[in-house]
Amino acid sequence: MSAPRPIHAPGGFTLIEVVIACAMAALIITGLYGAFSASLDAVSRVEESSGSLESTRLLSELIENDLLSLEPAAQNAPASAFFTAPKEADRQEDDDGDILVARMLTGAGGYFDDQDGPGRLYLVSYILRPYPGREDRYLLIRRELPHPFVARRDEENEAPTRDLTLAENVVSFSLSFEDGEQTDEPLESFDGEAREKAGKSPLPLAVRYALTLAREKNAETFQAVIALIPDSVVLR
């Protein structure tokens, strides 16, 4: 009678093999998660960049439309109807904390409703308003005064202005001007009323603006030069 064969335990993994496999799986999963997270972050940055570029393009078009539609103030018009842009260092806050950047009489307007038709004038102001909770950030506001009130001095302070927020997280919004005179540097301010009294053009020939917006990691500055009269002298 032959001796019984020894019984062997079924094949399996040792503890060391299991630990090694788990470690390798953890490394693979970590790598995949890192790649997936990086892809999501890249997509987010692209979408943010695309959105900011689109919004900035629309903002540029709106500013350009206002400037290209500038009109000189009529005779005996109130001082507020003249193109005005104080020097950045001389800007002052009003009682509401708003800071006037520029004020102009323009044919571009009526963005709020269909009651205003073409061929009418609007008193438009660009304003920096302190961003809630941030002393170093602003909202860029476009304030439009409906055309019936432009020439009414007695009702100017009670006119129903209409505000449109153009940009948030604004760090700075600066303007400079070319008046056609041969100067080494562009003008940092413009006073249309004073210039008209001096026998000069109450409107600039070209305007440069620079808008700086705070982003998540850094700030972006957008610049443009808008020639208001064909073949005008380009800002230096």
Image (spheres, rainbow, N blue to C red):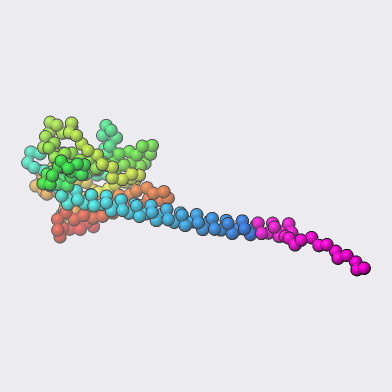
Q: Would residue 231 be found to the left or right of residue 136 on screen?
A: left
45 displayed left or right of 206: right
Is residue 164 located in the magenta-colored stretch of the structure? no
Image x and y of residue 34, in percent = 53, 56
**Which one is in front, 138 or 234?**
138
In this view, the residue farthest toward the bottom is 2
Residue at x 40%, y 51% (from the top left corner): 218
Q: Residue furthest left?
A: 75
User: Magenta region, mostly helix, strand or loop?
Assistant: loop
Q: Determine which quarter of the picture holds residue 185.
A: bottom left
Image point 30% across, 51% down: which residue? 55
Q: Is residue 104 visible?
A: no
Q: Quadrant of the N terminus?
A: bottom right
Residue 121, image quadrant: top left
For the record, the magenta segment spans 1-22
Residue under the image location 19 percent in, 34 percent down? 160
Residue 42 shows in the view = yes
| Numbered-mark total | 0
Pick whichever, 99 or 121, lies toward us.
121
In the current view of this chain or complex, which residue is farthest to the front?
A: 1
Residue 196 x/y as whole percent = 11, 45
| x then y, percent, for residue 88 | 27, 44
- Residue 25 at x, y percent in the picture: 62, 58
Quadrant of the image containing the C terminus: bottom left
Residue shown at 14% from the left, 42% from the top: 116
